[in-house]
Image: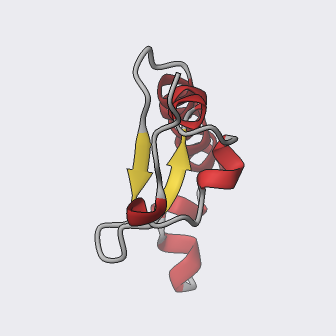
Amino acid sequence: MSPAETEPESDPGTQRLLKSERDHYRAVFDQSPLPLLLCDVGSLTIIAANHLAAKLHGASPEQLVGTSLFEVRRVSD
Protein backbone atom coordinates (compact mmCIF):
# COMPACT_ATOMS: atom_id res chain seq x y z
CA MET A 1 0.00 0.00 0.00
CA SER A 2 1.19 3.49 -0.80
CA PRO A 3 1.27 6.14 1.95
CA ALA A 4 -1.63 7.95 0.27
CA GLU A 5 -3.78 4.82 0.50
CA THR A 6 -3.21 4.56 4.26
CA GLU A 7 -4.00 8.22 4.97
CA PRO A 8 -7.54 8.63 6.39
CA GLU A 9 -8.01 11.78 4.26
CA SER A 10 -7.70 9.66 1.10
CA ASP A 11 -10.80 7.62 1.99
CA PRO A 12 -13.85 8.83 -0.02
CA GLY A 13 -16.11 8.52 3.04
CA THR A 14 -13.71 10.61 5.09
CA GLN A 15 -13.51 13.18 2.31
CA ARG A 16 -17.32 13.51 2.26
CA LEU A 17 -17.41 13.90 6.05
CA LEU A 18 -14.66 16.53 6.02
CA LYS A 19 -16.45 18.47 3.28
CA SER A 20 -19.73 18.27 5.18
CA GLU A 21 -18.10 19.56 8.37
CA ARG A 22 -16.27 22.33 6.49
CA ASP A 23 -19.54 23.40 4.84
CA HIS A 24 -21.31 23.39 8.21
CA TYR A 25 -18.70 25.59 9.89
CA ARG A 26 -18.61 27.91 6.88
CA ALA A 27 -22.39 28.35 7.13
CA VAL A 28 -22.11 29.12 10.86
CA PHE A 29 -19.40 31.70 10.08
CA ASP A 30 -21.33 33.29 7.21
CA GLN A 31 -24.66 33.40 9.06
CA SER A 32 -23.35 34.60 12.42
CA PRO A 33 -25.29 37.50 13.92
CA LEU A 34 -21.90 39.06 14.71
CA PRO A 35 -19.33 40.55 12.32
CA LEU A 36 -16.48 38.04 12.06
CA LEU A 37 -13.00 38.27 10.61
CA LEU A 38 -10.69 35.26 10.45
CA CYS A 39 -7.03 36.30 10.42
CA ASP A 40 -3.65 34.68 9.97
CA VAL A 41 -1.92 34.88 13.35
CA GLY A 42 1.54 35.54 11.95
CA SER A 43 0.75 38.28 9.46
CA LEU A 44 -2.60 39.57 10.81
CA THR A 45 -3.95 39.29 7.28
CA ILE A 46 -7.67 38.63 6.86
CA ILE A 47 -8.29 35.21 5.35
CA ALA A 48 -12.10 35.24 5.65
CA ALA A 49 -14.82 37.75 6.46
CA ASN A 50 -18.56 37.37 6.85
CA HIS A 51 -21.06 39.77 5.30
CA LEU A 52 -21.67 41.70 8.53
CA ALA A 53 -17.95 42.39 8.96
CA ALA A 54 -17.78 43.52 5.35
CA LYS A 55 -20.77 45.84 5.80
CA LEU A 56 -19.20 47.31 8.94
CA HIS A 57 -16.04 48.09 6.97
CA GLY A 58 -17.76 49.25 3.77
CA ALA A 59 -16.47 46.44 1.57
CA SER A 60 -17.38 42.99 0.30
CA PRO A 61 -16.01 39.90 2.07
CA GLU A 62 -13.85 39.25 -1.00
CA GLN A 63 -12.38 42.77 -0.82
CA LEU A 64 -11.38 42.28 2.83
CA VAL A 65 -9.54 39.00 2.19
CA GLY A 66 -5.83 39.66 1.91
CA THR A 67 -6.07 42.97 3.78
CA SER A 68 -4.00 43.58 6.90
CA LEU A 69 -5.94 44.28 10.08
CA PHE A 70 -3.96 47.50 10.31
CA GLU A 71 -5.52 48.71 7.05
CA VAL A 72 -9.16 48.03 7.96
CA ARG A 73 -11.29 50.95 9.07
CA ARG A 74 -14.85 51.12 10.30
CA VAL A 75 -17.27 52.98 8.07
CA SER A 76 -19.25 55.68 9.86
CA ASP A 77 -23.03 55.29 9.79
Q: Residue at x 70, y 50 (%)?
A: 62
Q: Residue at x 46, y 48 (%)?
A: 73
| 34 relative position to 22: left or right | left
Residue 40's spot in the image, x, y percent?
38, 66
Quarter-of-image position of residue 50: top right
Q: How is the image coloured?
A: secondary structure
Quarter-of-image position of residue 27: top right
| 57 relative position to 12: left or right | left
Residue 6's spot in the image, x, y percent?
49, 72
Q: Residue furthest top?
A: 33
| Number of marks in the rendered image | 0
Residue 29's spot in the image, x, y percent?
48, 30
Q: Nearer the viewer, residue 18 or 56?
A: 56
Quadrant into which the N terminus falls: bottom right
Q: Residue at x 46, y 67 (%)?
A: 68
Q: Residue furthest left?
A: 41
